[in-house]
Amino acid sequence: MRFICYSINFHTAPLEVREAVALDPSRQRFLLEVLRSADEAVEAMILCTCNRTELYLNCPKKFNPETVVEKALSVVRPEAAAVWQSHCEVFEEKAAVEHLFSLAGGLESQMLGENQIVHQLKDSYTQSIEARTSRFCFHKLMHCAFRASKAVRQGTEINCGAVSLSMAAVETVRAKCRLEGAKVLLIGAGDNAALAAKYLAKSKITRLTIINRTLDSAKQLAETIRGADAAALACLPEYLAGADVAIFSTASPHPVLTAEDAGYYLSQRTSPLLIIDLAVPRDVEPAVGELDNVELINIDQLNEQVEKNRANRSLWIEPAQKIIRQHATRFIRWQESLDTAAVIAELSGRILGEAGTYARRNRRYFAKSDQERLGQFAEGLARKLLHGPIQYLKESDSPRARGDKAQAAELVRKLFLDTKKRRKGS
């Protein structure tokens, strides 16, 4: 099997590129279905956030993932296939494991050490389980990634202080205008919006209005924030006329605010309006930022606050990387221990060796003429008992086994080869 990570992220691709490959949940499910139908041995997971679109694969060496992925992308988002070809970063085997573990530990995030990426990874993992594209190896991989993440956060201070883009947005707003007494709009009701609402609630703003396409979702979030109210997305232009700050964080595939829609209401303003757009694809059309009395900041323009965050935590990068390498090495060793040929060789050597030892230990009870026959009997019985496990391993290594090879090797290892470890631990 071949473990690969394809990544388009904020380190290597600007916002307009990431927008082109942003996949909504229905497109993600379709891509997983295509990969599963192409070869049932393939394990796959898609992570799509405001800063990255990544595809993780564990596939047979004969499988050509590049062709399948590009073909599927050309169906779900025609403009994405060309962008994918020119901007995709590829990690393989140990490098892919270290990248995933670093991501889970917050080392690859725009806000170094942020915690939200763990929840996003868990959501992606759940989606892959529902799509039946996560099985034995990915179950082990993801649980190891979550353990590595926990070890980084417990063993370092890399996530101390402000650790989310939502917090960076609020801090940017605070640096540019007086939040105390401000009227703030929060457009969206997802995880980023919920975090922003939490931070805003601590800033003594006069009024927080949560606006969402689904009014019930806006009301549910508003109920968690004292003094907040909710409104439908259709009311957005009217609310913009009297707001001081608007923070956008929806999952819409298209802009929810255009210059044409908001032009009249914003032209009536005499005071500045600060707009922060955290969404990918962008919620706010860039032309809105060209209107009088409007300052528009998108996710890539939060770099000043992000760099301040990174500087405060940079001392912990090296210790965190050391923890990541340790966990990645542990996973790779486990993976290598499941090589079918190696397990068969170790199993045969262990069982035949034990049979020979017991035959030699008991040969004194037999006549010299029978001692050789005793050795033959012990070896023959051992080989007879070995036949079942070895056949099981060989069948799991066949194309029709659909990727059960690693699980079979792990089971045989636990049953027959790790018994000494269990006795020592007991």
Image (cartoon, helix red, strand yellow):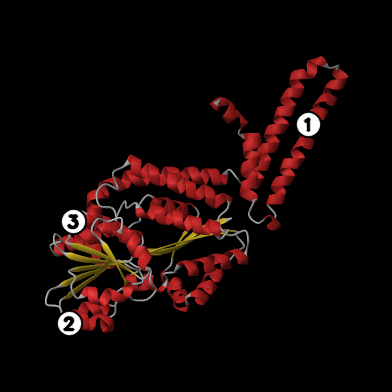
Q: Is residue 61 left or right of residue 276?
A: right
Seen from the viewer's position, the closer of residues 127 and 210 is 210
Q: Is residue 91 left or right of residue 395?
A: left
Q: Position of residue 74 (x, y in %)?
A: 50, 76
Q: Residue at x 42, y 45 (%)?
A: 148
Check disc 3: other Cα within 10 Å, few if <14, some if 14-19, many if 20+.
some
Q: Is residue 10 left or right of residue 4?
A: left
Query: In the image, which disc is placed on residue 203?
Result: 3
Sequence-earlier tag: 1 or 3 = 3
Q: Is residue 382 visible?
A: yes
Sequence-earlier tag: 2 or 3 = 3
Q: Residue at x 22, y 52 (%)?
A: 311
Seen from the viewer's position, the closer of residues 268 and 286 is 268
Q: Amino acid at mark 3?
A: Ser
Sequence-earlier tag: 2 or 1 = 2
Q: Amino acid at mark 2?
A: Ser
Query: In the image, which disc is placed on residue 332?
Result: none
Q: Residue at x 22, y 60 (%)?
A: 170
Q: Residue at x 29, y 77 (%)?
A: 257
Check disc 2 and report the residue beneath it: 267
Q: Position of residue 190 (x, y in %)?
A: 36, 62
- Above-or-below relation of 101 to 79: above
Helix, strand or loop at disc 3? loop
